[in-house]
Image (cartoon, rainbow, N blue to C red):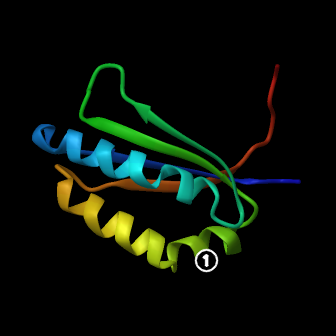
Amino acid sequence: MELLIRVVRMEFQEEHIPAFLENFHANKEKIRNFPGCHHLELWQDENFKNIFMTYSHWESEEALNQYRDSELFKGVWGFTKTLFAGKPTAFSSKKIVELP
């Protein structure tokens, strides 16, 4: 199965990082268990501690869009975007090569 890989880069105001992490941890299982989501990770930039990225695998673009149209996404994203220090960046990709 060829999965869609989604990366979302978010820059937060430093004082809002605890609120972001609390909200992410409260919802991570629901996001991961949403139909079509096969994998979910949260990353933090090594040098800029206020930059986080989500890395997820989706069955298809349609599955990702169903999540993005869901009440779960609207609630999580609606809260998260109030904490930003800069504009988020998101992109979807397909894996070409993986070397073990």
| Quadrant position of the C terminus in the picture | top right
| Quadrant position of the N terminus in the picture | bottom right
Q: Residue at x 36, y 38 (%)?
A: 52
Q: Residue at x 30, y 36 (%)?
A: 51
Q: Residue at x 36, y 71 (%)?
A: 75
Depicted 37 relative to depicted 99: above or below: below
| Front-lying residue, 15 or 3 | 15
Give the side of residue 63 with respect to residue 14, left or right: right
The local secondary structure at tag 1 comes to helix
- Residue 17 in percent (x, y) is at 22, 40
Q: Check disc 1 and report the residue beneath it.
A: 66
Give the side of residue 61 with respect to residue 99, left or right: left
- Identify which amino acid the numbered label 1 is placed on: Gln
| Front-lying residue, 45 or 37 | 37
- Residue 68 in percent (x, y) is at 51, 73
Give the side of residue 24 with respect to residue 35, left or right: left
Give the side of residue 10 with respect to residue 57, left or right: left
Instruction: Sort mark 1 into few (<14), some (14-19) or many (20+) by Cα contacts within 10 Å.
Output: some
Q: Residue at x 55, y 51 (%)?
A: 29
